[in-house]
Image (cartoon, rainbow, N blue to C red):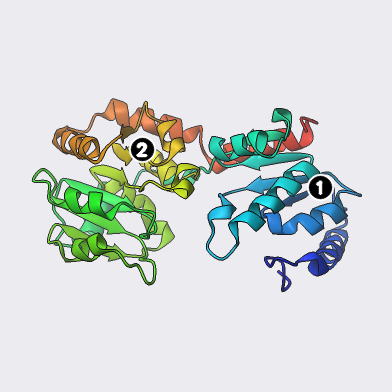
Amino acid sequence: MPPGWASRFPAWSASRLWSVAGKKVRGLGSKISGLVVTSPHYLPLVRLAKQYVPTFYYCSDDYAQYAGWGSDVMLRLETEIVRQVAHSFFVSTALAERAVKDYGVPTDKVSVSPNATSDDFLKPVAEEDLRALLARHPQLRRPLVGVVGGINERLDFELLLKCSSLREIGSLVMVGPIAANLNNKAFDQLRQHPHCVFVGAQPHAELRAWMQALDVALIPYCESRFNQSCSPMRLFDHLAAGRPIVATAACAQVGEFANVVRVGRSSDEVLSYLVEECRRISDMVDIERRRILAKKNTWATRAENLKRVLHTGNH
């Protein structure tokens, strides 16, 4: 990307982007038939390109909550960009509803396209491979409750500390990179807890095995505006693994899957669900029910839906 694309003043780079894109496409013997942008910073590019091709906006997060991006600036840019493009895609209902309610965009110009899982995560991992994975961490004990994904301020560390102290839990395993400069007293205590094991960032190819090795998956988001409107990829990957899932109510999209995810409205309710799931013998019917749902929420499925909107004139 050229310098300036994600600054507050990216207009000077828009013409360069458009020129380079056109040259690349012509080199492939084709021409640009449409433009999809993924950040409000691309507003100048949309203004330029819409003279020639249909333009679209794909929003994967509440960018107004990004540190250093300027919330008011982002909201103004996003308001303008969704009004300029032919159609906008948002990863969550909350973000799409904001576009309709706050930005005044017609409902037929807005779609919800959540994050998803991949076919790789649907493939079963051999039992011997799961045993070999866990053998690398002999301190782990079953029942194994796991948090897979980035370990940062979006997580409720006080809840996780309580989880670690449950007698019914063998180990709480934290699989993922730890954010730099994470300043949280409960997190510091969690790192010292004998029932909590941090295994660090893992190769993406091994995440499927980690998710299938768990007895219970935990999505412990804390209450925040960002979490409420997000679309957690870990949710769909956990569905593909088929294991029981317990989550806080901090993310609205997780609540949309309450038929297969146990969503606790309070810390005590989350802890109660964890205890129940740790005591429960895995039900293959429930495991397959989650996996069937995951098959309907793959990136391939999302791509087909996006393609349909882009090419059927529903914009």
The location of residue 6, given as percent across then percent down, is 67, 65
Between label 1 and label 2, give the one nearer the viewer: 2
Q: Quadrant of residue 261?
A: top left
Q: Residues within 10 Å of mark 1 (few under 14, many from 20)?
A: few
Which quarter of the rendered picture does the C terminus lie within?
top right
Q: Nearer the viewer, residue 219 or 234?
A: 219
Residue 34's disc is 1
In the rendered image, is residue 136 in sight? no
The location of residue 91, given as percent across then percent down, is 57, 42
* Relative to 202, 158 lies left or right: left
In the rendered image, is residue 68 in sight? yes
Q: Farthest residue toward the left?
A: 167
Name which of mark 1 and mark 2 comes first in the sequence. Answer: 1
Q: Please report the residue visible at 65 percent of the width from the left and 50 percent of the height from the top.
A: 75
* Relative to 39, 272 lies left or right: left
Q: Quadrant of residue 205?
A: bottom left
Amino acid of disc 1: Gly
* Relative to 162, 310 lies left or right: right
Q: Please report the residue visible at 71 percent of the width from the left and 66 percent of the height from the top.
A: 5
Q: Please report the residue visible at 43 percent of the width from the left and 59 percent of the height from the top.
A: 204
The location of residue 173, given as percent across then percent down, is 24, 55
Residue 249's disc is 2
Amino acid of disc 2: Ala
Q: Farthest residue toward the right?
A: 51
SS for callout 1:
loop
| Placement of 182 over or under 231, stated as above or below | below
Residue 22's disc is none
SS for callout 2:
loop
Distance of label 1 from label 2 (alpha carbons): 38 Å
